[in-house]
Amino acid sequence: MCNNQFSSLILLIFIIAGCATGSDIVGTGEKAADTVLLKGQIYTVDNLKSWAEAVAIEDGTIVFVGSTKEISPYIGPQTEIINLKGKFAMPSFVDGHMHPGWSAYTYLYQAALYDLYTTEQYLDKIREFADENPNLKGIMGAGFYRSVFDSNGPKKEWLDEISTEHPIAVTSNDGHSMWVNSKTLEMIGITKDTPDPKGGVIKRDPETGEPSGLLHEYGAMNLVWDIFPAATKAEYKKSLLWLQDWLNAEGITTAHDAWLEFDPNYYEAYQELAEEGKLTVRYRGSWYIEPTDDFMEQIEQGVELAKKFNHPHFKAHSFKFFADQVIEGETAFLVEPYAHRLDYYGQKTWTDEEMVDAFSKVDKAGLQIHVHVIGDGAAKYTVKALEKTQEINGERDSRHSFAHVQMAKPEDVKKMGELGLSAHMSQYWMNIDEYFWDFYLPYLGPERAFNETYPHKSLFDAGVNVTVASDFNVSKPDVMFAIYSGMKRILPIGKYMEWYGYDPKYRYVTNPDAELRKYDMSYLPPASECVSLDEMVAAATINGAYANFLENEVGSIEVGKKADIVVLSKNIFKIDTEEIPNVEIEMTFFEGKRVY
């Protein structure tokens, strides 16, 4: 066959390949790529906020971004051609703070209560799990909502109806409380005379003083773990593989595990899956440091372990601290006292001196600090500790971060920007509706609850690197909902329950006669704390990448970066804001491989 005939044959093959995919683009093959996406509306999230129509991918890396007319050289006989037919695409999402390994484990191996909302439903599920697992020597569960119960919380007697012979322990959906039966209290030695442990609270019956069956925070909850079997490495691996299908379906391909345990079963599950090439989510992680233990020794252990984990899909170069806990547990640390306890400011988890010692050690090792901050008092003393750390060690590109930042004074928000911090914001929690505000108002009072929570726009304006964080399992990962929440802040009454299947009539199960309290809605938060779609898209992509030192690899669609791309059912820049939560993920690519 002469050269002209051969060239004609090759051209015919390319034409057929183009027609087979519904494309009229003729490939010339000079730079043939593995995969080509074309005829799309592609928002790149680059520095210029550019738009494109086509992307070419080779060996998992983006090699071309531009127009459909320019894509021909990247189409060869083996190229997979995906005609987007005008669909919207953007970089896939980064979840800045979640708890993937442990949360997935609770779904698969415990009584999972996450989609249930009444005492009866909880007890039925726990009983069902116990019946299905008769060989277990103890029953564990997770996911009950603290807001379902009154201020005294769930009672041990209700779990005693399921078993008095075996321990039962159920963790709340936010991870800050644990509901236990009498057998558990007996086995860990808690009685009426047991004082609250450091960093924890034993909830008491208001009339008798006896332990009621509710434990708050890790100082108390940690007493329970040892009486139950530890999760195995195989169980964690199965849990992570199960979860990544869920995350990919939500367009998430990078996530930060904000609580890495010093448990070989836990961290080796990540490492082995990475080495086996089985991860379709890129993980970064923070070693959890417990202030009631020898925290300096823990940090030394974490520094040494961090050196071992440098796989592109799993690195653990950060450390997790709790500056305080949560408002609903009355353990968040506030500048002004709680509204219903005028002499009580909450719990300060660290002393100033110990926090500076711990931060300085991590920072000197060149690693990151990742701090849970809820109350404005916690924000204030943690900012001061980071300022002192910088004085001791000098300035560097540290990218330390706060998670949640539910409250912070304006002067501390300003300092967060000056320190170059990231804020992993749980936009999922920012909505104003009857459920949320009826839950938080008793603790903060209306003025603080409405006007001094979630300084979202203020953080952006101060130069803080704001990200999107589900805090899964506290919130289910749903980036479209998070984007909407960050933009609007105010939901129609009951909208949150409608989306997530929550029936508001069940909120006062233990006090069914309680009337729904009404508050002066003139306390609605200032519109200045709502942010733009551009800001929320950046938070869900490039900002999350930057927080993890990944901005040169992912977070935008640019030549040389990994092909982490998501295709949505609608162009979120061309629809009404109210439609954004209903936009669906149609395709997700992780390093060029279609994983959903």
Image: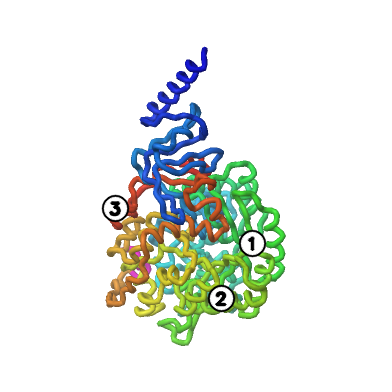
Tell me, what colour scheme is on the image?
rainbow
Q: Is residue 354 visible?
A: no
Residue at coordinates 63% horizontally, 67% vertically from top-left?
A: 289
Which label lies toward us, 1 or 2? 2
- The quadrant of the picture occupied by the C terminus is top left
Mark 1 residue type: Asp
In the displayed orientation, state which residue is furthest to the bottom: 343
Q: Which residue matches tag 2?
A: 382
Disc 2 crowd, CA 10 A, few/some/many (<14, 14-19, 20+): many
Disc marking residue 226: 1
Per the model, the C-alpha gap separating discs 1 and 2 is 31 Å
Secondary structure of the residue carrying tag 3 is loop
Residue at coordinates 64% horizontally, 46% vertically from top-left?
A: 272
- Marked residue nearer the N-terminal end (2 or 3): 2
Which label lies toward us, 3 or 1? 3
Asked whether the residues under the numbered discs 1 and 2 touch, taking CB atoms below 8 Å apart as contact, a structural biologist would say no
- Marked residue nearer the N-terminal end (1 or 2): 1
Mark 2 residue type: Thr
- Marked residue nearer the N-terminal end (3 or 1): 1
Disc marking residue 575: 3
367 or 176, nearer to the observer: 367
Q: Which residues are magenta?
A: 505-511
Mark 3 residue type: Ile
Per the model, the C-alpha gap separating discs 3 and 1 is 52 Å
Q: Is residue 313 above or below residue 421?
A: above
Residue at coordinates 33% horizontally, 51% vertically from top-left?
A: 582
66 or 273, nearer to the observer: 66
In the displayed orientation, state which residue is furthest to the top: 1
214 or 380, nearer to the observer: 380
